Image (spheres, grey):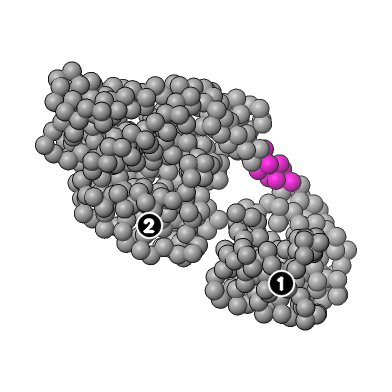
Amino acid sequence: MDALSDLVKLLTDADKKLFKQFLTRKNKRQDVKNLQLLHLIETDDIDGINKLYDTPKNKDAYHALRKRLQDNLLSFLSQKTFENTNSDAHEALRLLVAGRFLLENDVVKVAFKCLDKAERLAVNLEQFNLINELLLLKLQYAHLPGAENLEALTARFMHNQSQMQREARLNMAYAYLRQQLQAIHLEGKIMNLTSLMITTIRKYKISVQDLMSYKSVYQILFIANEYAAIQQNYGLIERFVTRTDQFMTHKPADRQAYLFYHISILYYLANFHLRQRHFGKSGNYLQKMISLMQTDHRYYALFYLRYQLLQALNLFFTGSVDDAIALLQESLSKLKSTSKPEEVEDLRICLAMFLALCHHKASLKQLTLLTHTDAWYEKHMGMLWTIRKNLMEILIQAQFGNIEPAMSRLSSFRRRYKKYLLKTSEERVLHFLKLVEKYLLQPNIVSNTAYKNAVLRLLDKEGEQDIFTLSFIAWLVARGEKRTAYEVVLNVLNSAPNED
C-alpha cells in the first residue's frame, strides 16, 4: 500500500466530498487531473491509473500529479483536524496563534488575555512545549503596557525549561526501552526486565521523582506488559503492577490531562490480572476503566474495542461462554472505518478461539476472515500473536477432519518459525507441535497411555499456566476425552487456587 492510498483511506464519505470541493477551489486550470486521479484511487482502478497519461513519456507528469495530490490532501487533513478538534490542547494552540496575531497588530490587552488563558490550559495539561512557546511570546512583548512582570515571567520560563528537560529524558528512556523490547521480540535477545529498567534509569539520569507521574507510570507499565506477553509469564512483572497500584492510591488523577494515561493504566492492570487468572480483580479494573471512558467520548471510542476484548475474555474464562461470544459478535458488527485493524484482528482471532474450544464449526469461517499475510501479522500484531494464529489454524483444521490442510500448515509453520523458536528458547512450542503431528498422522494415538501422559504433563509444567497456552493444551487433552476443550479449560481453572 502506498502513502497516497493510505491517506485517502482516512477520509470518510463526507470528508471526500469536502476534499473534492477543496481541490475544485484550488484548481486554476480545467485540464488538471487531480480529481480524476482521486477517483481512480478510491475505486482501486489500476488500469485507469495506467491510462491517465497517454504515453510513457508522461511518467514524470504522473508522479508530479501524485505529489501535488498528496500535498493537497495533507493540507486538507491538517486544516480539518485543527478546525474539528475540541481538546483543551488545541484550544490553547488556537489562543496562542490568535494572541500572536493580535500582538503583531497592536491589540495588546485582548492579546494578553488570550495568552493567559492559553497558558492556564497548557499548564493544566502539562504541555511543556506549548508553555515554552507561550512564555517566549510573552517575553518578546514584555516591554508593552499591561505585560506581566519580567522577573515572574523569567522564573516561570526557567522552571518550564527544567520540566521540558525532564520530559525529554523520560521520552528518550522510553524510546530506548521500546528499542530493546523490539530486540527481545524479533531477535530473541535475552535480558532481565528489572535490570534493563535500572540500567535505563541510570543511563538517562532519571530520578525517582521523575517517575512519579501518570505518563511515566503508563510508559513503564506498557513496557512491562509487552515484556510479559513476549515471555508468556505475567508473574515476571508483578512488582511493577504492585508499585502502580501504590502510585494510583496515593496520587489520584484529578486532572483531565491524566485521563488517557489513567484509562491506559487501568487497561494494563485489568489485562495483567486476567492473564494471572485473577478474574474478579480484572473485572474490577474494567469497571473503573469503563466509568472513566464514559466521561469523554474521545476516549470511549479509542478504548472501546480493547475494553470489549478484555470483558469477553473475562466472561469466557469464568464460564459465561454465550455472553462472551455474543459480546465479540456485537463488537465486530459495529466496527467503524476508524477502528484500528490490529484491534479488529484481536477480536476476530479471539472469537475463532472461543468457537473452536466449544467445538463450533463456525470457527472455520472466522479463520477465513484473518486475511493478512504472516509478514503483516508479524509487523503489526507481533511474532507471538502470529505464531499463536498459525497454531490455531492447524488445530482448528485438524479438529474438523481437514487433516491434509492441517499437515500442510504444520510443515510451513516449521519452515518459517523453527529457527526463531529455538533462538528464543521456545522449544516447548516445537514439543507441542510434535504431539499435534503425532495426532494428525495417527488419530487413535490419543488412546495411548504414554501419549496421554505426555499431553497431561504439559499442564503441570511451570510457565504453562498462561490462559492462552492452557487453551492450546486443553485442545490436545480434549482429543482423548469425550468433552470439549472449553470444558477442559474450565476444569483446570476451577481446580486451581482462587487468588481473587
Q: Is residue 130 magenta?
A: no
Instruction: Pick out the residue farthest to the front.
Output: 55
Cα distance, mark 2 to mark 1? 44 Å
Residue plotted at (51% across, 37% down): 223
Q: Which mark is residue 34?
A: 1
Q: For mark 2, what is the residue?
A: 290
Residue 417: horizontal and vertical position, in percent? 46, 30
Residue plotted at (35% across, 49% down): 367
Nearer to me, 373 or 255: 373
Q: Which residues are magenta?
A: 161-169
Secondary structure of the residue carrying numbered label 1: helix
Residue 490: horizontal and vertical position, in percent? 19, 39
66 vs 206: above or below: below
Secondary structure of the residue carrying numbered label 2: helix
Q: Are marks 2 and 1 in contact (CB under 8 Å)?
A: no
The type of residue carrying mark 1 is Asn
